[in-house]
Image (tube, helix red, strand yellow):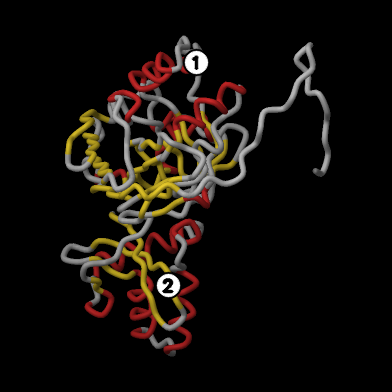
Amino acid sequence: MKLARQVVEDVDGKSSRILVMGEHAWIDVRSAVRHEAESRGATPGGARRLAEALVPSSMSAALAGGAAFLDAARAAAEDEPEMARVVHPNLTNALDPATYRDFMVFEEHFSFGYRWQDKPVPDVLYQMPISYAGDPRSFIGPGEEIPWPGYTERLDYELELGIVIGAPGTDLTPDEALDHVLGLTILNDVSARDIQAREMTGALGPSKGKHFACVTGPLIVTLDELSRDGLRMTARVNGETTCETSSAEMVWSVAEIVAWASQGEQLLPGTLLGSGTCNGGSTIETGRVLAPGDVIELEIEGLGVLSNVLGTPASAGWAPTERERTPDGKAARHRFLR
């Protein structure tokens, strides 16, 4: 099954609608549910309320509905009601994540990244799949302009596999984990490389280097429609291919990533887990410097193409200044509210 979301605009403004791919066309799942309810005797108002409850605008909220939502989506794909068909949908981010964390499991990329920082590769990367917590509110969709914060001069893309959790789970084993995965999507974990490199010398995960923008889409594709042997992954900048690799080159598998993420905590429907950058999937490896207006195209076999343009750098805002220190290296003065 292929799921997506489109942007619609009416008298109440813009909103998102969940779509499912039928054999011949995209189907608006909410419209299909409303049509089915009316055919079974519901009043127009009752059918509308039922459809809005079962198929909200949020993909994460819809997935929280469990089998009721998924069954409705499958039925819509099979029935393809004429009145619910959508031609040339204006697709937005396929998933508005409930929570988001990003891992680092492609060996060639993380090895190059540490060499780029003149550091040895930490043993922990071979001992467990490690991650940082991202901002689920920062997500945009295909075709949208990627914002360029005023505090960075080095913007970068990251071609990643996005793992979408479809069913809640805690303390899962790798053998159980894939039963809790709805499907996969393309993920672009946009990065401000200069500020990221500086802040991570403090031994904490990236924050300002990452939290301003992330992109998913255009589709979420369920695992049953994808190859189990690996997916081709390709990146292009202004039409020039910069990366060709495979998802089969991960140190930790999708099942192991999900299982470890679930230890001691509950994974919720709509949770997004990133694989980390694939081998060659950023400008760290190529040395290319991106510029405003560059077109970034990320493609994963079976998941479509995610295309965005880099925006114009914002004006520089407030920035912290280095604290004055005493001869023994401590802060010269301390502060509270101001």
The amino acid pointed to by label 2 is Lys
**Circle 2/circle 1 CB separation < 8 Å:** no
Residue 75's quadrant in the figure? bottom left
Are there few (<14), some (14-19), or many (20+) residues within 10 Å of tag 1?
Answer: few
Mark seen at residue 14:
2
Q: Earlier in the sequence, mark 2 or mark 1?
A: 2
Residue placed most toward the observer, 156 or 49: 156
Residue 81 image position (x, y, % from top left) = 24, 76
Query: How many angstroms separate mark 2 from mark 1 (CA)?
Result: 46 Å
Quadrant of the image occupied by residue 203: top right
Residue at mark 1: 127
Q: Is residue 104 left or right of residue 333?
A: left
Image location of residue 80, percent across then percent down: 23, 71
- Coordinates of residue 13 in the picture (x, y in percent): 45, 76
In this view, 187 is above or below 283: below
Question: For the residue labelled by badge 1, is the local secondary structure a helix, a strand or a loop?
Answer: helix
Spot occupied by residue 311 in the image (x, y as percentages of width and height): 37, 50
Front of the two marks 2 and 1: 2
Q: Looking at this view, is 184 or 37 the one in front?
A: 184
Q: Residue at x 57, y 38 (%)?
A: 170
The image quadrant where one finds the N terminus is: bottom left
Give the residue at x 45% y 39%.
273
Residue under the image location 38 percent in, 55 percent down: 93
